[in-house]
Image (cartoon, rainbow, N blue to C red):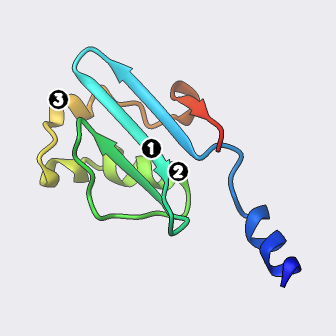
């Protein structure tokens, strides 16, 4: 039983939240309770979930899928899809 718990703990990424803010833009990329990556941009969080933070950014921001959820395309153009530009937060 303890071994199973250790295996699950090992799957946690080194950072479970990334944030990006600038004038008029507040973004949070987070690892949810179901161990999937999700994103919130200016308070809008779609149902989409991803296995990797990079794929979440590429699909929802890079391909402008967030516009269907009500995020203006001009705002999306200012959100970086490179994780290196986001502030990292540990679990």
Residue at mark 1: 29
Instruction: Work out which residue is located at the far right of the displayed protein and give it.
Output: 3
Closest to the camera, between mark 3 and mark 2, is: 2
Label 3 vs label 1: CA separation? 19 Å
**Residue at image coords 37%, 22%:** 21
Residue at mark 3: 74
Q: Are marks 3 and 1 in contact (CB under 8 Å)?
A: no
Q: Earlier in the sequence, mark 3 or mark 2?
A: 2
Q: Are marks 2 and 1 in contact (CB under 8 Å)?
A: yes
Closest to the camera, between mark 3 and mark 1, is: 1
In this rendering, the answer to whether 78 lies above or below 12 is above
Judged left or right of residue 81, residue 73 is left
Label 2 vs label 1: CA separation? 7 Å
**Residue at image coords 31%, 29%:** 26
Label 3 vs label 2: CA separation? 22 Å
Badge 1 marks a residue whose secondary structure is strand
Badge 2 marks a residue whose secondary structure is helix
In this rendering, the answer to whether 25 lies above or below 43 is above
Residue at mark 2: 53
| Residue 10: mark in rendering | none
Judged left or right of residue 10, residue 79 is left
Q: Is 56 in front, or is 12?
A: 12
Kindly indicate the quadrant of the structure image that contains residue 20.
Answer: top left
In this rendering, the answer to whether 56 lies above or below 8 is above
Q: Is 68 in front, or is 21?
A: 21
Q: Earlier in the sequence, mark 3 or mark 1?
A: 1
Instruction: Work out which residue is located at the far top of the displayed protein and give it.
Output: 23
């Amino acid at each position: 039983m303890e071994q199973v718990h250790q295996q699950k703990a090992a799957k946690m990424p080194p950072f479970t939240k990334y944030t990006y803010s600038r004038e008029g833009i507040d973004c949070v990329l987070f690892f949810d309770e179901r161990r999937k990556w999700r994103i919130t941009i200016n308070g809008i969080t779609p149902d989409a979930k991803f296995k990797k933070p990079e794929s979440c950014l590429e699909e929802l921001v890079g391909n402008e899928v967030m516009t269907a959820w009500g995020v203006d395309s001009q705002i999306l153009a200012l959100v970086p899809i490179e994780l290196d530009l986001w502030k990292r937060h540990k679990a």
